[in-house]
Image (spheres, rainbow, N blue to C red):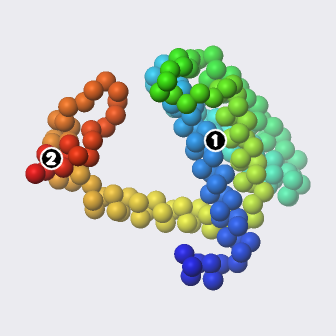
Amino acid sequence: FTAVAFVVPFDTLWDIVSFGILLSFNMSMSSLLMVRMRKESPSLAPKLIGAMVAFAWLAAFFYQIGYSNEGHTWCLVLGIIFLVLTVLVCFVMFFKCPQEPQSGENFTAPFVPFLPTVAVLANFYLAAQISYTGIYTSCAWLAASVVFYFAYGYKHSAGRNGWSALLSLPRDSSMRSPMISEKKQLQE
């Protein structure tokens, strides 16, 4: 990482870090929505959350890059259309995907799904203001990370040595995976 700091200009490094942080915030907002809505509507909630994130991304980038940076009026129109679609999907989530009742296990957040939707929009709007070089470099870094992650996971996967042993481990109703210590006991 030190070599990267010597080669890449500071402005680009700043943009990479900013893009990564904003992307992480959006992932946490999407995860919050998923945790709160998945039990009550397991098939509809993921689709609506994905649509909301995609529409928010398109709204922010069409507005910032297409209209503010380039001055294209058609990008403003598309940005407004995607913003309206984002708001509509948010209201559909509110009415069609009831939230899981509050319990001690879940993180409590007010105004779900409205506040996370506003946060996703704001984060994408800020990400759209990052330089093209920063965005492209961030995407390349993310792609390289995904490749290394899956290559490492494939090489060290417990499933490569037999899924049947892992799947036969006792489970409780909490939907949690078996403990690693149980997996090691099976291997011995």
Camera-side residue of 20 and 68: 20
| Secondary structure at numbered mark 1 | helix
To which quarter of the image does residue 177 belong? Answer: top left
Instruction: For label 1, count other residues whose C-alpha is less than 10 Å away and answer few (under 14), some (14-19) or many (20+).
Output: some
Quadrant where the N terminus is found in the figure: bottom right
Which residue corresponds to the image point at 54% horizontal and 26% vertical from the top-left? Answer: 36
**Residue tagged by mark 2?**
185
Residue 186 percent coordinates (x, y) = 13, 45
Which disc is residue 109 wearing? none
Residue 78 percent coordinates (x, y) = 78, 41
* Proximity of marks 2 and 1: CB atoms separated by less than 8 Å: no
Camera-side residue of 63 and 95: 95
Which residue corresponds to the image point at 75% horizontal and 64% vertical from the top-left? Answer: 131
Which residue corresponds to the image point at 17% horizontal and 53% vertical from the top-left? Answer: 161
Which disc is residue 54 wearing? 1
Instruction: For label 2, count other residues whose C-alpha is less than 10 Å away and answer few (under 14), some (14-19) or many (20+).
Output: few
Distance between the alpha carbons at the discs numbered 2 and 1: 43 Å
To which quarter of the image does residue 59 belong? Answer: top right
Upstream in sequence: badge 2 or badge 1: 1
Residue 66 higher or lower than 28, as above or below: below
Residue 102 higher or lower than 13, as above or below: above
